[in-house]
Image (cartoon, helix red, strand yellow):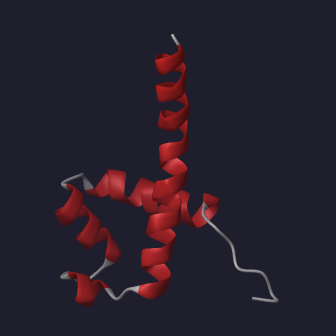
Amino acid sequence: MELLGELETVTWQLPTVGHHVIARLQREASPVELGAKSLGSVLTQRLRISGKEVRRRICEAEDLGPRTTLNG
């Protein structure tokens, strides 16, 4: 049961990691450098997921990902 509890904890934490990665890609990488015209296209091709799923993940990353304060 302890292993299942730990697995559940990790499962709940994974989307947060994804938000951070996508937000960082938006800030620091050019889609052209990654091999496509847009970040959505990059994610669709690399992760082999639908455009709808990509849009959902990008929106979540924008809404729930890390923020930069006015102080930097």
Q: Is residue 28 left or right of residue 67?
A: left
| Residue at the top extreme, as displayed | 1
Residue shown at 24% from the left, 82% from the top = 34
Q: Is residue 62 left or right of residue 29?
A: right
> Is residue 21 shown above or below 28?
above
In the rendered view, would you say 65 is above or below 36? above
Residue nearest the observer in this picture, 10 or 36: 10
**Does residue 15 lie above or below 24 as drawn?**
above
Residue 57 image point, x, y percent: 44, 56
Tell me what residue is drawn at x 42 percent, y 76 percent: 25
Q: Quadrant of residue 38?
A: bottom left
Question: Which residue corresponds to the image point at 18% horizontal and 54% vertical from the top-left?
Answer: 48
The image position of residue 29, as x and y in percent, is 38, 86
* Placement of 57 over or under 7, stated as above or below: below
Quarter of the image where the C terminus is located? bottom right
Residue positioned 51% across, 59% down in the render:
19
Foreground residue among 61 and 16 = 16
Farthest-out residue, right = 71
Give the image location of residue 6, x and y in percent: 52, 27
Could you say which is closer to the camera, residue 50 or residue 20?
A: 20
In the rendered image, which quarter is residue 58 located in?
bottom left
